[in-house]
Image: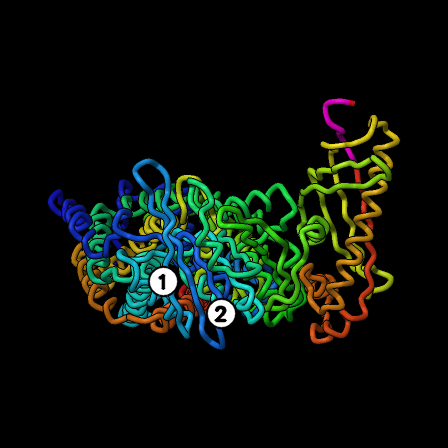
């Protein structure tokens, strides 16, 4: 019996060689990639790998190839790489302007199929060339870390609504909701910024929301959000409001089913104020002003979406879920007739450490 | 020989029945059952799971009724109803049943490893290593098998904490409107839960090994309740995490859900999850091997040690012939169907037969 016990252990020791090894120093880990369309049916793709140097800095290395099929892209890039490419470390994927206009689901779908790619990957579009963004030099931690952190902290603490690979795919496959992605722009070889939000119709980019509107969009799109916004209170008086917690609820009005009521609650602080003194009265004023502003801007946003026939907030989804037995085929017609009502409650809890 | 009483020192405490049943039920099905159910019942899939779970309570009650009446395991019940020869012939089918069960589990798990981790891994060598481990466990006797069942539940239990990561991305409005699907569709969903739920029928085979079988009843029901709630909860979470069509595409929804997990020290959590899962399916595999060899002993008087060896070797040979996704899907499907027929059709039938024979014998 004792002898028998050793057989599994021996087997486990010796059969480890049955699977090909991937030693970290002998592979190239793809850290970011960018795709764009050259002309009809020809794609160009860039893959960024990072080499970690002995002095703890990283070197960005890019490979670029063109191909007719998306699959060939990776094959062509493999041919340039001195070590086998692995997809496991992918963090950011950027789609060029032309490609986003044409549809990106083929690329995204493949990410979903590949088990080595995580669902928290960031997808983004670019204004201008997607490939150039990867070819810049953005600091010692490497380009992919830079881009990843850029998107992540803006999503967590600022105005960028939450998206990643999972959310994009989920929205794409949800009946009655369209996905959205952040748009990046390269300022120069050392700087890159978030320049807006690409709104999609299915998988085609149809509109880019400017950064000023992103705060309002996030209030509408995310169930919980935070971000900051500036309110003008007339001459020489400006207040910045940082929303620390907000909630939004979408309900279909019971009386009129074609009316959507969006209830937004914002709890915020005033970190910046240019004026004499913050009195409770001014706080009230700021609250009122922000409420008005949010109502106005959000309403114009949803009306704009309605005109464009896109539905990034997911009104169709709420129709399907809140009306029993809703025939989704009617949705396109119903959407055109939909009216909106936005109610905002702003509650400012703190005004900083000085009066 | 057939009805030798089991010595007390080989028997197990009644509460261990809980671990036997849960560890046998939770196996390969839970990695991807969501898609199959949602295909029919859509957002009401969790109701299907609840219905299936509550029906199983009735089946467990029936199983205990059968075993109490004949005071023995399934083979005794068969002999009681149909006589020695036909009774044993009927029992032979269950050797095949548990053989297929073990094959399905191991092959499905291997498929997961091949798709998610190592595409080139050899089926033969892994099976050989795994089988040797299982043979070793079974040679330790029934109580060792029960011990493995205990650890197969307790050690991987931490995996369920991981689903906390998914809560952040869950939108429970996906579950609305409740009961929007026809009752027939919901029941069809329940029917497809078979593969995920089967495993509780093993009580029929180790009943003589339970000390105080009366007391084990409540533990059996508690086990069913636990798995039902677990599956229902996971189903609700899955439905609110994915959108309908996305779920329809995910063969292993549970594993896909782990793709969102992000921890500072591990990039891809699935690798840890899948490796841990080998501990979850270990009791599955061991118990089904044990039951099959036990049946061989009861029917053909074949020494259990030889029986285990025989079944293991057959497993090792047959598993190489199941190659593709379709074949694995097919064998999963067949095992699920066989499980459904056994538990939901055969057991009630057997109970009726046993009760009739009992009345006749009294006269």
Asked if residue A351 is among those painted magenta in the image, a careful observer would answer yes
Numbered range of the magenta stretch: A348-354
- Relative to residue B334, is residue A121 depicted above or below? above
The residue pinned by badge 1 equals: B77
- Is residue B204 something one can see in this rendering? no
Q: Residues within 10 Å of mark 2 (few under 14, many from 20)?
A: many
The residue pinned by badge 2 equals: A37
Q: Residue furthest top?
A: A354
- Relative to residue B212, is residue B90 depicted above or below? below
Q: Secondary structure at mark 1?
A: helix
User: Disc 2 and disc 1: Cα gap in Å?
Assistant: 71 Å
Of A147 and B354, nearer the camera is: A147
Give the letter of the chain under mark 2. A
Placement of the N terminus of chain A among the 4 image quadrants: top left
Residue at the image point whose x is 77% and y is 56% from the top: A251
Give the letter of the chain under mark 1. B
Mark nearer the viewer, 2 or 1: 2
Instruction: Locate residue B202, reporting x and y percent.
Output: 37, 56
Q: Residue furthest front?
A: A188
Of A138 and B300, nearer the camera is: A138
Of A40 and A173, nearer the camera is: A40
Residue at the image point whose x is 43% and y is 67% from the top: A44
Residue at the image point whose x is 31% and y is 66% from the top: B100
- Is residue B266 something one can see in this rendering? yes
């Amino acid at each position: 019996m004792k002898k028998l016990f050793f057989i599994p252990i021996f087997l486990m020791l010796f059969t480890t060689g049955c699977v090909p090894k991937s030693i970290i120093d002998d592979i190239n880990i793809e850290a970011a990639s960018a795709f764009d369309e050259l002309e009809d049916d020809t794609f160009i793709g860039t893959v960024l790998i990072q080499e970690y140097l002995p002095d703890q800095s990283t070197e960005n290395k890019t490979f670029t190839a063109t191909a007719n099929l998306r699959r060939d892209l990776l094959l062509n890039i493999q041919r340039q790489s001195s070590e086998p490419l692995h997809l496991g470390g992918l963090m950011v994927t950027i789609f060029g302007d032309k490609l986003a206009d044409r549809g990106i689901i083929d690329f995204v779908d493949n990410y979903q199929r590949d088990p080595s790619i995580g669902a928290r990957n960031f997808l983004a579009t670019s204004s201008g060339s997607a490939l150039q963004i990867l070819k810049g030099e953005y600091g010692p931690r490497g380009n992919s870390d830079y881009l990843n952190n850029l998107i992540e902290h803006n999503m967590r603490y600022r105005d960028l609504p939450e998206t990643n690979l999972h959310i994009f795919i989920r929205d794409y496959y949800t009946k009655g909701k369209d996905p959205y992605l952040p748009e990046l722009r390269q300022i120069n070889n050392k700087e890159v910024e978030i320049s807006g939000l690409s709104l999609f119709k299915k998988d085609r980019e149809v509109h880019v929301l400017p950064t000023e509107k992103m705060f309002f969009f996030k209030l509408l799109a995310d169930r919980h959000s935070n971000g900051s916004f500036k309110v003008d209170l007339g001459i020489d008086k400006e207040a910045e409001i940082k929303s620390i917690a907000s909630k939004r609820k979408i309900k279909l009005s019971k009386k009129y089913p074609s009316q959507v009521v969006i209830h937004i609650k914002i709890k915020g602080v005033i970190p910046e104020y240019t004026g004499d003194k913050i009195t409770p009265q001014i706080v009230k004023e700021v609250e009122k002003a922000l409420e008005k502003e949010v109502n106005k801007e959000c309403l114009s946003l949803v009306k704009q979406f309605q005109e464009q026939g896109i539905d990034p907030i997911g009104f169709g989804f709420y129709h399907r879920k809140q009306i029993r037995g809703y025939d989704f085929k009617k949705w396109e017609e119903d959407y055109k007739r939909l009216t909106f009502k936005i109610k905002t409650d702003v509650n400012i809890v703190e005004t900083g450490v000085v009066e | 020989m057939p009805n030798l009483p089991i010595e007390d020192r080989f028997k197990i405490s009644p509460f261990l029945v809980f671990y036997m049943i849960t560890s046998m039920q939770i196996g390969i099905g839970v990695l991807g059952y969501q898609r199959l159910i949602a295909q029919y019942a859509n957002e009401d899939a969790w109701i299907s799971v609840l219905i299936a779970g509550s029906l199983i309570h009735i089946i467990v009650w029936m199983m205990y009724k059968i075993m109490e009446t004949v005071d023995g395991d399934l083979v005794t019940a068969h002999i009681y109803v149909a006589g020695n020869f036909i009774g044993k012939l009927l029992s032979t089918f269950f050797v095949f049943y548990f053989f297929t069960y073990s094959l399905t589990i191991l092959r499905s798990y291997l498929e997961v490893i091949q798709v998610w981790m190592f595409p080139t891994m050899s089926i033969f060598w892994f099976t050989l290593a795994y089988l040797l481990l299982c043979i070793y466990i079974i040679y330790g006797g029934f109580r060792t098998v029960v011990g493995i069942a205990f650890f197969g539940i307790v050690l991987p239990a931490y995996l369920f904490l991981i689903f906390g990561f998914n809560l952040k991305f869950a939108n429970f409005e996906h579950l609305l409107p409740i009961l929007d699907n026809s009752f027939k569709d919901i029941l069809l969903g329940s029917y497809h839960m078979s593969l995920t739920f089967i495993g509780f029928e093993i009580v029929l085979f180790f009943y003589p090994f339970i000390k105080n079988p009366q007391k084990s009843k409540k533990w059996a029901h508690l086990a069913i309740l636990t798995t039902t709630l677990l599956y229902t909860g996971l189903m609700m979470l899955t439905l609110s995490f994915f959108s309908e069509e996305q779920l329809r595409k995910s063969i292993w929804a549970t594993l896909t859900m782990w793709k969102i997990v992000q921890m500072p020290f591990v990039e891809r959590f699935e690798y840890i999850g899948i490796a841990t899962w080998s501990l979850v399916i270990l009791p599955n595999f061991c118990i089904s091997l044990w039951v099959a060899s036990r049946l061989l002993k009861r029917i053909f008087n074949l020494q259990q040690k030889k029986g285990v060896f025989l079944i293991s070797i057959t497993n090792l040979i047959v598993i190489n012939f199941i190659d593709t996704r379709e074949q694995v899907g097919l064998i999963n499907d067949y095992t699920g169907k066989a499980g459904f027929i056994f538990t939901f059709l055969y057991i009630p039938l057997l109970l009726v037969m046993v009760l009739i024979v009992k009345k006749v014998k009294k006269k």
